[in-house]
């Protein structure tokens, strides 16, 4: 029983170890196979000291690079 309790307590600690700050994610962009500017753009609205998991960062990068709705492009020189 005590072994099970120790591993259950270790899981939240392990989750905290896998989280990084915004600057740490930008500096380690290669881990996600992305460029630093892509990570910075995806995390622009995150706090400097906010801890983010890899899954959270990956989801933000995917949303940043592949937005759900596309903006309408209008040619300002066209005569409509």
Image (spheres, rainbow, N blue to C red):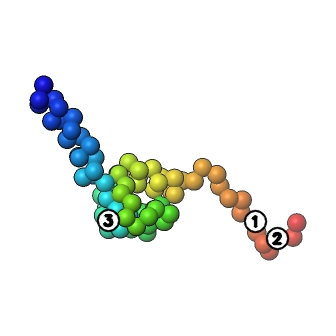
The residue where tag 3 is placed is 24
Q: Nearer the viewer, mark 2 or mark 1?
A: 1
Of 32 and 21, which appears nearest the observer?
21
Q: Residue at x 28, y 46 (%)?
A: 15
Q: Which mark is residue 35?
A: none
Of 30 and 19, which appears nearest the observer?
19
Secondary structure under tag 2 reads loop
Percent x, y of residue 10? 19, 41
Marked residue nearer the N-terminal end (1 or 3): 3
**Structural crowding at the residue carrying mark 3, measured as other residues with C-alpha within 10 Å and reported as few (<14), some (14–19) or many (≥20):** some
Residue closest to the far right: 80
Residue closest to the far bottom: 77
Marked residue nearer the N-terminal end (3 or 2): 3
Secondary structure under tag 3 reads helix
Count how many numbered circles sit on residues in the image.
Answer: 3
Left/right placement of residue 69 relative to residue 49 reads right
Q: CA distance from mark 1 to mark 3?
A: 38 Å
Percent x, y of residue 41? 48, 65
Q: Residue at x 21, y 38 (%)?
A: 9
Percent x, y of residue 35? 39, 65
**Residues tagged 2 and 1 counted as in contact (Cβ below 8 A):** yes
The residue where tag 1 is placed is 74
The residue where tag 2 is placed is 78
Percent x, y of residue 70? 65, 55
**Residues tagged 3 and 2 counted as in contact (Cβ below 8 A):** no
Q: Nearer the viewer, mark 3 or mark 2?
A: 3
Left/right placement of residue 2 relative to residue 11 reads left
Q: CA distance from mark 2 to mark 1?
A: 8 Å
Q: Residue at x 52, y 57 (%)?
A: 64
**Quarter of the image where the N terminus is located:** top left
**Quarter of the image where the C terminus is located:** bottom right
63 above or below 37? Answer: above
């Amino acid at each position: 029983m005590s072994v099970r309790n120790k591993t259950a307590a270790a899981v939240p600690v392990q989750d905290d170890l896998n989280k990084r700050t915004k600057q740490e994610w930008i500096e380690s962009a290669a881990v996600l196979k992305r460029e630093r500017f892509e990570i910075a753009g995806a995390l622009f609205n995150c706090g400097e000291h906010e801890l983010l998991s890899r899954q959270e960062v990956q989801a933000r990068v995917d949303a940043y690079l592949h937005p759900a709705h596309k903006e309408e492009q209008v040619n300002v020189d066209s005569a409509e």
